[in-house]
Image (spheres, rainbow, N blue to C red):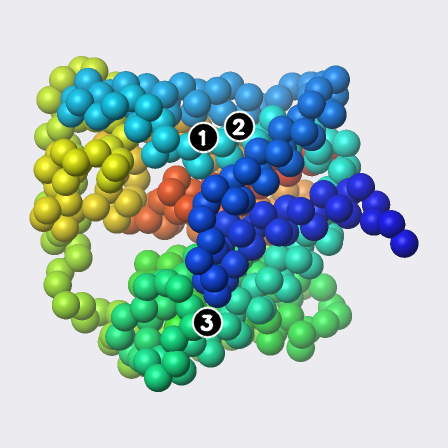
Amino acid sequence: MLLKKKDLNTLILGLLLILMCHVMYLINIVDGIWILLFILFFGLNYVRCFRVKINNSQYTSIIILGVIMVLLSAFMAHYNVGQPIALGIDGQKIFLIILLSYFSLRKLLSRKMIDLELFEKIIVGIGIIECFIYIGQHYLYPNVVFLNCMINIRNGARIYADTVIVELMIMIAFSRLLKESSNKIKNSMILFLGIFYEFVVAQGRLECMAILFVLLCSFLIYKGHSGKKMIMGSLIVIFVIWFFNSDIFSGFMTTEYNTMEIRDVARKLYYSRILSSPKNLLFGYGYLTSGYSDVVRFAGVQKELYIVDNGIFGFIYSYGVLGAVFIATLFFKSMKLALQFCKKRGELLPFMFLLLNIVLSYNIVFWWWKSEWVFSLIFCICYLETENQKTDF
């Protein structure tokens, strides 16, 4: 039996997510492979859907502003440190390409050419497989190493793997537990598996705190049965008490060097650079790529100051006030729609995903420099906009 076109499109999106996540780090794969497939898929679908008109698009101007912001940052890096403009654009090509996919993805969703229910099942399925793979590596390390990613020792083996699919899986399972009366055991097991991975294997301090905060906020705003809310609330409280009294939390609080102090030094450097001239304040100091030799000196890398480790501060350092306006407008508009979804339709996932990104942004901006996170954000805003046009809020 031949696959329906929307099923095929959905499976391709799942494949792209797997490739963006480095095939669960089981094999070394260059970004060029998925980038080529990504461009072909969204480029061809844009051509096919070219005549499809999207009325009252709320994000077109924001996406265009994002593209302008990327191009200007390449010019600013050339202006400030002499970095070639082409190199500055090349360093941002993934962010730029995924931003532009908005125009094709928006039309695909408008024409119902993606099966959202199937896509959710794919995310959960991939998330479960990822958890078992990463947990297996956690317990086999250092005797057996089969993942091609960074691993260090903290409460056993800490695995640095991309986690957007696992975090989406956690949020999907949690929202199902609140909304659905069936499959409670199944969804509870999926939720536990994801939480176990995040707290025991990934061990990202801010990520773990952010996940707890998002689950608690979602629980509080959800208009469900009081009995369900009491049970879920009790479980959250029990877990929080256990976590703060566990060895895992103690390990989070002890590091080989003071990361907050290093971040403070980095941010002072960034402030001094962008405040050095009106141009830098407005457009940022520019996107500095590791492919340019002088970046080590200008970005503070020799002092262990990394832009990607400084969250929204590193983003504003690169893009200035223009970048701040871009991302603030995008998140504000999206959160407004997501909250309406929560209140009117009981849909929690968009709100949870956006809130997680906002909370993480203080130190971590995955939505800027990790491809699967950028794509998940673009998919989220396309979904919100499409559903908004179907429903009168």
Which residue is the site of mark 3? 134
Left or right: 55, with 362 as reference point: right
Expressed as whole percent of the image width and height from the top left, the position of residue 253 reads: 22, 69
Do tag 2 and tag 3 residues touch (Cβ < 8 Å)? no
Describe the element under mark 3 as helix, strand or loop.
helix
Please state which amino acid type lies under the numbered disc 1.
Leu
Describe the element under mark 2 as helix, strand or loop.
helix
Q: Which residue shows up at 42% across the image and 68% down it?
A: 147
Q: Is residue 88 placed above or below 245 in the rendered structure?
A: above
Q: CA distance from mark 1 to mark 2?
A: 6 Å
Please state which amino acid type lies under the numbered disc 3.
Tyr
Upstream in sequence: badge 2 or badge 3: 2
Q: Residue furthest toward the right?
A: 1
Of the numbered discs in the image, which one, if any, rests on residue 96?
A: 1
Please state which amino acid type lies under the numbered disc 2.
Leu
Q: Residues within 10 Å of mark 2 (few under 14, many from 20)?
A: many
Upstream in sequence: badge 1 or badge 3: 1
Expressed as whole percent of the image width and height from the top left, the position of residue 161 reads: 41, 61
Of the numbered discs in the image, which one, if any, rests on residue 372?
A: none
